Amino acid sequence: MAGDDLPPLDTLRQTIQEKKQRIGEPPPDEAMSSKALAMRMGSDIIAGVVVGALLGYFLDEQLGTKPLFLSVLLLLGIAGGFLNMYRTYLRASAAEDATENHTEKNHQ
């Protein structure tokens, strides 16, 4: 058959990835798109707030201390959400710097 002469698909993928790296295009997993980064940061904040509020509400219901745990854990959830958002920013910034350095080296 004519299709028997074709190279394996994995070999083609590897060749494409090598050529992309040679011309300076970052591999798909290295850099986040701006939309993905915004979604990740937003979900970090929302997750911290929701988890803190739900856990605080549950503890207040069980222990009979109505606003205490809700208030404290909500504030901790907000702080944790911002901390996660900051960490995501640092990772994305480092990946972007690495990509820029990679591109500059290939064009020199």
Image (tube, grey):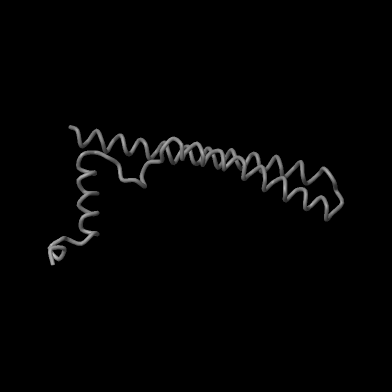
Q: Quadrant of the C terminus?
A: top left
Q: Residue 62's spot in the image, x, y percent?
A: 83, 55
Horizontal side of 20 relative to 5 (left or right) equals right
Q: Residue at x 68, y 42 (%)?
A: 76
Residue 9 picture quarter: bottom left
Residue 71 left/right relative to 91:
right
* Residue nearest the viewer, comparing 30 with 93: 30
Q: In the figure, residue 71 lies in which quadrant?
A: top right
| Residue 17 coordinates in the image, percent (x, y) | 24, 49
Q: Is residue 5 above or below residue 81?
A: below
What residue appears at the point 44 percent right and 41 percent down from the top-left corner? 91
Residue lying at 56% horizontally and 38% vertically, measured from the top left = 42
Choose between 30 and 73: the one closer to the eye. 30
Q: Is residue 68 left or right of residue 93?
A: right
| Image location (x, y in percent) of residue 41 | 53, 39
> Residue drawn at (20%, 39%), measured in percent from left and top?
23
Could you tell whether 96 is left or right of 20 in the image?
Answer: right
Image quarter of the N terminus:
bottom left
